[in-house]
Image (spheres, grey):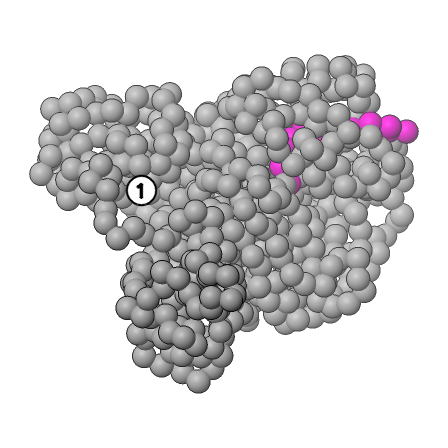
């Protein structure tokens, strides 16, 4: 029997595994980098072992250090989580060679599916339908669009869509470099890109006694940068015949490689309803909770049992209801999904808790809590919000409600995008595809309605707080230092004007009347409708929450600090990160053209390129490969150009918060 488990991972998945271990009476061991010394998964573990350094290559990707940590802490089993070394056959062998229990599939099965090219060969031999590969060296215009994919690893890293033949060679080079950096293997292959395809997968679970379960389907079509954002189970709108085909193909894939444990077989569904094998993930998936909720299972507990030699029942329990999951990221979708950093002041998601027998039922899986810092080294996922209900419509409504009422104070997040996505007709009807955000992002990230009222509420709350501080003793009565003159403040892009009166405040805004004010709550009547706003300030950062939405505003000073001004043509770092490379031959005095990639930054396991804002001469170059920079740091200067920094996300995160 397993008595102590080391989780070779961090963040949300480590906390998730620890939760099941505690319920089963199994001791837990965490590993942590220097950047994660105070992380939630470290605080929740019974024992923790430091991995010196901060970069993944020095810490969570060091299998030798993790095995030593397990032995030093007295663990007798290792759970890999997802991402990092979870699909590394050599790591699995090292764990087994050390006399530890590996909570995952056999190394041979991992190896067979580690290369997508080899996996496709095996699946083709097993009769699983495939997309025919395309040789990039002989590709023609008729082969476009193409999808470039890393042969090793997953999560969208090293993935590119190529729509123009002249860009194929450069995109192959970039994809190969990313794949080599992420997985240590630069092999990249090309296949046809299916427009408006759906991403549907099957959760499998197999024991060592010949039983293989296919646990329904999941639709993971809502993706950005080939990274999943919203997932659900079962996949909506699939004919029964197609569901049978997917289940049979998934079971065949598992049996072909002698699989054991939890895994996922992923398929692409064309608009015509044809299914094509994409890959097999030999690990637990980020989106596994929706399957757990539908089948009433704990997949981590089943992984542990299978690792101990337990036998699965012949058939899984019946599916019931519908579950949906949304990934809450610290990122700004309106700025090309740029990751965000800083302190997470508050994370509260309201709804019926998972242990209450009501519907819709809410579950929140996270690796962060109030006061934690979101750094630059790892994935930007803050939490997964999961809702189960008897029907898809109820689950959809419950997830919208939970996200809309969530209080997330700190870095900018994708929460508003998630709410709007769940309201979109294509999502409501269950017909979204993998190109959904490519087509609809601008509309989904347009300025939120009602922000001007949130700014007004923020200003009034601040004024009420000042008035409270300035109130004289009751026997003197009245306020001190609050005159009847009109005052103003700027919050975000909104300048608001108001005046203190004997009865409260008057505002200069058409159709708005102040009902009540307090330092943390303001009620406004807007066009005859009373709305309540909860206001919380953290320095100049102000969060305003209401039933209609939540807003993150910056209280701006009346006068700009001259030291913060930048010269025209300055290229500034759009986020904290590390300079990973600069364009070949780039040096001061070089002539550059508008849109030319000049500098590449890496932050939160994503690579971003900073391009020339216009044609001109590079008159300064401060970026140095390997150097960490803060947001707003001066990277370079191009003469005679406007200050416009165009940041283009060029790859995707791993499919895990790590």
Quarter of the figure with residue 372: top right
At 29% from the left edge and 50% from the top edge, which residue is drawn?
557
x and y percentages locating residue 562 in the rendered image? 20, 40
Q: Position of residue 416 (x, y in %)?
A: 47, 60
Q: Quadrant of the C terminus?
A: top right
Rate crowding at label 1 as few (under 14), some (14 to 19) or many (20 or more) other CA atoms within 10 Å: many
Q: Is residue 503 magenta?
A: no
Badge 1 marks a residue whose secondary structure is strand
Q: Nearer the viewer, residue 313 or 602?
A: 602
- Identify which residue, 286 or 45, lies in the foreground: 45
The residue positioned 36% from the left and 60% from the top of the image is 481
Magenta residues, start to end: 1-12
Please tell me how many numbered marks the rendered image carries.
Answer: 1
Q: Is residue 229 visible?
A: no
Q: Quadrant of residue 80?
A: top right
> Is 11 inside the magenta-drawn segment?
yes
Identify the residue under disc 1. 647
Relative depth, front residue between 400 and 434: 400
Residue placed furthest toward the left: 640
Q: Where is residue 159 shown, x and y percent of the image?
A: 44, 39
Q: Residue lying furthest bottom in this view?
A: 528
Rendering coords of residue 558 (x, y %)? 26, 53
Against 346, is 507 above or below?
below
Residue beneath the point at 39% across and 34% down: 576
Residue located 54% across and 27% down the image: 35
Q: Is residue 646 visible?
A: yes
Pick the front one: 98 or 506: 506
Image-based side of 596 in relation to 114, left or right: left
Q: Quadrant of the N terminus?
A: top right
Left or right of residue 215, residue 490 in this image = left
């Amino acid at each position: 029997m397993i008595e102590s488990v080391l989780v070779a991972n961090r963040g949300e998945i480590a906390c998730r595994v620890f939760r099941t271990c505690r319920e089963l009476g199994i001791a837990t061991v965490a590993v942590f980098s220097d950047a994660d010394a105070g992380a939630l998964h470290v605080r929740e573990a019974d024992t923790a072992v430091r991995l010196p350094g901060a970069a993944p290559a020095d810490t969570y990707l060091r299998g030798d250090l993790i095995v030593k940590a397990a032995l030093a802490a007295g663990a007798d089993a290792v759970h890999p989580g997802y991402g990092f070394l979870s699909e590394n056959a050599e790591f699995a062998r090292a764990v087994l060679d050390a006399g530890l229990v590996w909570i995952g599939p056999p190394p041979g099965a991992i190896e067979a599916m580690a290369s997508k090219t080899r996996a496709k060969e095996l699946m083709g031999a097993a009769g699983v339908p495939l997309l025919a590969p395309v040789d990039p060296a002989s590709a023609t215009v008729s082969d476009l669009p193409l999808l470039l994919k890393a042969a090793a690893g997953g999560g969208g890293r090293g993935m590119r869509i190529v729509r123009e033949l002249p860009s194929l060679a450069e995109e192959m080079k970039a994809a190969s470099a990313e794949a080599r950096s992420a997985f240590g293997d630069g092999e990249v292959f090309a296949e046809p890109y299916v427009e408006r395809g759906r991403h549907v997968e099957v959760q499998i679970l197999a024991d060592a006694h010949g039983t293989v379960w296919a646990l329904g389907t999941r639709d993971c079509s809502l993706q950005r940068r080939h990274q999943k954002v919203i997932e659900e189970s079962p996949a909506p709108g699939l004919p029964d015949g197609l569901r049978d085909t997917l289940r049979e193909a998934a079971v065949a894939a598992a049996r072909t490689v002698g699989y054991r444990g939890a895994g996922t077989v992923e398929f692409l569904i064309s608009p015509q309803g044809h299914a094509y094998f994409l890959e097999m993930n030999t690990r637990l998936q980020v989106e596994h909770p929706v399957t757990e909720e539908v089948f009433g299972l704990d997949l981590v507990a089943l992984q542990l049992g299978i690792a101990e030699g337990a036998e699965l029942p012949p058939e899984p329990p019946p599916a019931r209801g519908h579950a949906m999951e949304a990934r809450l990221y610290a990122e700004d979708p309106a700025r090309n999904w740029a990751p965000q950093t800083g302190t997470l002041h508050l994370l509260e998601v309201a709804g019926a808790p998972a242990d209450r027998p009501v519907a819709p039922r809410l579950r929140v899986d996270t690796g962060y809590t109030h006061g934690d810092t979101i750094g630059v080294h790892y994935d930007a996922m803050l939490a997964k919000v999961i809702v189960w209900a008897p029907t898809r419509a109820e689950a959809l409504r419950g997830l919208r409600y939970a996200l809309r009422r969530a209080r997330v104070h700190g870095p900018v997040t994708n929460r508003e995008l998630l709410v709007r996505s769940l309201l979109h007709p294509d999502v409501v009807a269950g017909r979204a595809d993998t190109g959904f955000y490519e087509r609809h992002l601008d509309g989904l990230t347009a300025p939120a309605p009602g922000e001007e009222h949130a700014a007004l509420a923020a200003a009034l709350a601040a004024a009420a707080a000042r008035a409270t501080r300035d109130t004289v003793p009751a026997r003197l009565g009245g306020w001190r230092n609050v005159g009847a003159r009109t005052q103003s403040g700027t919050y975000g892009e909104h300048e608001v004007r108001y005046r203190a009166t004997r009865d409260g405040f008057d505002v200069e805004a058409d159709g708005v009347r102040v009902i009540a004010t307090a330092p943390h709550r303001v009620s406004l009547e807007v066009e005859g409708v009373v709305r309540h706003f909860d206001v919380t300030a953290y320095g100049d950062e102000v969060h305003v929450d209401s039933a209609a939405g939540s807003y993150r505003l910056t209280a701006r000073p009346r006068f700009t600090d001259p030291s913060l001004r930048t010269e025209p043509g300055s290229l500034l770092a759009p986020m904290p990160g590390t300079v990973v490379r600069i364009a070949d031959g780039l040096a001061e005095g070089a002539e550059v053209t508008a849109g030319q990639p000049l500098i590449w930054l890496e932050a939160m396991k994503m690579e971003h390129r900073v391009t020339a804002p216009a044609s001109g001469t590079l008159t300064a170059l401060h970026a140095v490969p390997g150097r960490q920079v803060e947001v707003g740091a001066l990277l370079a200067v191009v003469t005679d150009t406007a200050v416009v920094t165009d940041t283009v996300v060029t790859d995707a995160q791993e499919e895990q918060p790590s």
